[in-house]
Image (tube, rainbow, N blue to C red):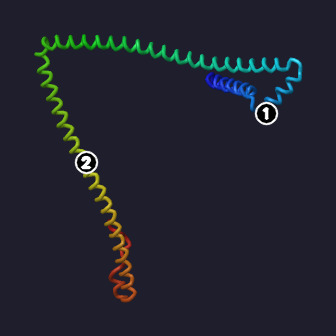
Amino acid sequence: MIDALFTTLASFAALLLVLALLLLIPGLSYPVVALAKLSQVPGGMTVLGTAIASGVLAASNLLLIFILRKLALTLSAVERAKLNERFLLKQSESLRAEYNRLHADRDGGQAAGSGEAVPLRAELEALQAAHTDVQGKLGKAEKARNTALANADALQSQAKGLEAEYDRLLAENDGLKRRLSRMDPSFQASHRPSDKKST
């Protein structure tokens, strides 16, 4: 918000400066007419000169304020960057010292504890191999399970299809028996249409 205010003030100062310069340009007709009218008024030229000087000074002051504000912001950012740089430099030096201390401890500790590390490394490698083996078996078991589930779904849908086909064939058989009994009355007495479905 402050930057917007200073930008507006700088624009206003530049506008005042341009207007003051336009009054001083000899080729423009409006300033010439204004000067002619002011020259007829006693003390008019002095008032015009004072107004122009005041406008130029105000515009210059606003422009200087804007420039100084930007300079202060830039210097503040530079100081913050320098502080951050110093802090990061101290932090990196302390981390480097810690790193060197740990490596010195590790190099000295490796010679003393190298006998303990060999069995632990062998045990770690054995555990990693067992883990890899179990992961492989788990992957195969998951594939077999997914295949079995897919087969079960396929068999279930096939069974539903066969049941629907069986029901259709029973209905067709009953219909054929009815037609045959209408054509041959002796068939009706010996065979009755089935009312029950066997499942």
Q: Position of residue 5 (x, y in %)?
A: 66, 23
**Residue 139 location (% of width, % of height):** 23, 43
Kindly identify the amino acid type of the residue bearing the numbered disc 1. Ser
- Tell me if mark 1 has few (under 14), some (14-19) or many (20+) residues whose alpha carbon lies within 10 angstroms of its own: few
Residue wearing tag 1: 29
Relative to 197, 28 lies left or right:
right
**Residue holding disc 2:** 145
In this rendering, the label closer to the viewer, 1 or 2: 1
Q: Quadrant of residue 187?
A: bottom left
Q: Where, quadrant-wise, is the N terminus in this rendering? A: top right
Q: Secondary structure at mark 2?
A: helix
Tell me the residue at 36%/85% (across/down): 180
> Considering the image in quadrants, where does the C terminus appear?
bottom left
Specify the amino acid type for callout 2: Arg
1 or 2: tag closer to the N-terminus: 1
Nearest to the observer: residue 108 or residue 29: 29
- Measure the alpha-carbon separation of dots 1 and 2: 97 Å
Residue 105 image point, x, y percent: 21, 11
Q: Which of 174 and 194 lies nearest the eye of the viewer? A: 174
11 lies above or below 111: below
166 to the left or right of 120: right
Q: Secondary structure at mark 1?
A: helix
Image point (36%, 74%), residue name:
194
- The vertical placement of 181 against 85, above or below, is below
Residue ID at (83%, 28%): 34
